[in-house]
Image: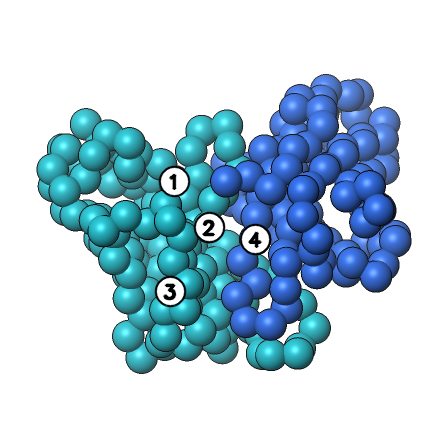
Chain colours: A blue, B cyan
Amino acid sequence: SQQGEEDPQALSIQEGENATMNCSYKTSINNLQWYRQNSGRGLVHLILIRSNEREKHSGRLRVTLDTSKKSSSLLITASRAADTASYFCATVKTNFGNEKLTFGTGTRLTIIP
Amino acid sequence: DTGVSQDPRHKITKRGQNVTFRCDPISEHNRLYWYRQTLGQGPEFLTYFQNEAQLEKSRLLSDRFSAERPKGSFSTLEIQRTEQGDSAMYLCASSLGSYGRAPSAQYFGPGTRLTVL
C-alpha cells in the first residue's frame, strides 16, 4: 500500500521557474527520501532527510520535513527541460535492517522549454 | 557500468506460464530489494534480502512468487502460473547497510516490464 500522497499529481511550468512538490505520509518515520523517475534512467535517488532534520539542500534541490504535520516538500529551483520526470517521496520507518521504501503516488513534472 | 542491472528488460508471456527475472546488484551491496510498480502508481515493496537471507516478504507476494539470492550476489524472482494481474514493472534495488549505520539510499535497476496476455 502507498504510504501517502504527493501533491499536485501533475505540474507544468516554464523552464527557469521554480517547482514545488509536496508529500504527505501517515506513520512515524526514520527518514524520507525523494526519487526521480523518467523513462530513460529509471528511478534515481535525489536526496535523503532524516526525521531529526528540518531542511536539506543539494544543488538546485531543497527539501523540507515537518514531522509534526507528517509532510515534506521538494523545491527545484531554476528548472530545466531535463527535470521533466515523475517525482516520488518515499519513507523509511527504521534504519535497523530492512530499510524498505514506502512510496507515495508521485508528481508528474513537465518543464516547458 | 557498475550500477544495478536487470534481465530481461521486457517479457511478454501467456497466462499460466512461468517467468523468471534476474537482478545483479552493485557488487559491494549487501541489501537487495524487489518492488513492483503498476502504471500511475509508486513502487510497492515485495521482498528484502540481507546477503543471502530473505528477511521479509510483503503480503503482495503470493505463493506463486518466489525469490532467491544464492551466495548473496545476484537475485532471481520467479512467478509461477502468471495471471494478467501480474502485469507490471518489477524493480530491483540494492544498498549498503548495517545495523545502526546511517540510513542509505537505494540504487535501482532499469526494471523488467512484464506483460501477461
Residue occupying image coordinates x 19% and y 27%: B117
Say if residue B20 shows up in the picture.
Answer: yes
- Mark 1 vs mark 2: in front: 2
Give the Cα separation between the discs numbered 2 and 3.
18 Å
**Looking at the image, which is closer to me, A57 or B50?**
B50
Where is residue B114 shown, x and y percent of the image?
A: 29, 38
Label 4 near label 2: C-beta < 8 Å?
A: yes
Helix, strand or loop at mark 4: loop
- Location of residue A31 (image quadrant): bottom right
The amino acid on which the numbered mark 4 sits, given as a three-letter code, is Leu
Crowding at dot 1, Cα within 10 Å, few <14 / some 14-19 / many 20+, comes out as many
Tell which subunit mark 4 falls on: A
Which one is nearer the viewer's eye here, B7 or A3? A3
Residue at image point 65% right, 24% down: A9
The residue beneath circle 2 is B45
Q: Which element type, helix, strand or loop, lies under badge 1?
A: strand
Q: Quadrant of residue A81?
A: top right
The residues tagged by marks 1 and 2 sit, at their Cα atoms, a distance apart of 12 Å
Q: Which residue is mark 4?
A: A101
Pointer 3 residue: B24
Q: Tell me which amino acid carries mark 2.
A: Phe
Q: Is residue B16 above or below residue B103?
A: above
The first of marks 1 and 2 along the sequence is: 2
Alpha carbon separation for disc pair 3 and 4: 19 Å
On screen, residue B97 above or below B113: below
